[in-house]
Each structure stands twice: as C-alpha cells, then as structure tokens.
Amino acid sequence: MQCVFVQLQCAPGATYRVAEAILDREIHSELYSTSGNYDLLLKLYIPEEEDIGRFINARLLDIDGIQRSLTTMTFKAF
C-alpha cells in the first residue's frame, strides 16, 4: 500500500458536505479539518497496483465542492 496525504480546499460553506461525502466513500484512513490554505487533510492508503493519480481523480476529486487539492507522496516512515 502507498500512503499519500491529500489536502483539499473547499468552496465556501462546503467543507462539511465534502467531508461527509468522503466518509460515505470509505476510502480514507484519517480525515481532519484544518486551518490555513486548505480545509481538509486526509490520509489514504492506495493499493500498489493502482495508479495514484487515477485513484484520486476517480474516487475523490469528483466530489462537488472541492476547488483545489494538494497531494503529498510518502516514501518512508521513521
């Protein structure tokens, strides 16, 4: 499994709706509300055989209310 973190910027007033849609899809390991430039932070474990970009686009970024995303790949846990 590949661990990635995705930060999401939501349309004004859409953060809770976006979070609920993510919860319904059950694709995340952890989901947090954050302050700063992004509204949500989620941790995903993507199967090795999956293309990360396609996985995120198909299973996450089609949620209405998401305006922008930032994906951070991870390589090694210490």
Image (tube, rainbow, N blue to C red):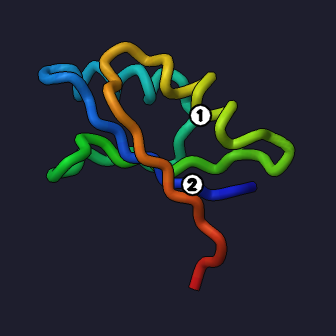
Task: Judge the density around disc 1: few (<14), some (14-19), many (≥20) Cα neighbours within 10 Å.
Answer: some
Quarter of the figure that contains the C terminus: bottom right
Quickly name the residue at label 1: 56
Q: Quadrant of residue 57?
A: top right
Left or right: 56 in relation to 68? right
Residue 27 sits in which quadrant? top right
Q: Residue at x 86, y 44 (%)?
A: 49
Is 51 on the left or on the right of 30, as rendered?
Answer: right
Q: Is residue 13 left or right of residue 33?
A: left
Return the residue found at the far right.
49
At horizontal 57% and vertical 54% (from top left) the residue drawn is 4
Q: Earlier in the sequence, mark 1 or mark 2?
A: 2
Depicted 65 relative to depicted 6: above or below: above
Q: Position of residue 16 (x, y in %)?
A: 23, 26
Query: Residue 13 location, x and y as percent?
Result: 13, 21
Q: Residue furthest top?
A: 64
Q: CA distance from mark 1 to mark 2?
A: 10 Å
Query: Percent position (x, y) of residue 51?
Result: 76, 40
Image location of residue 35, percent across then percent down? 15, 51
Q: Which mark is residue 32?
A: none
* Mark 1: amino acid: Ile
Whether tag 1 and tag 2 are in contact, CB under 8 A, the answer is: yes
> Disc 2 residue type?
Val
Which label was assigned to residue 4? Answer: 2
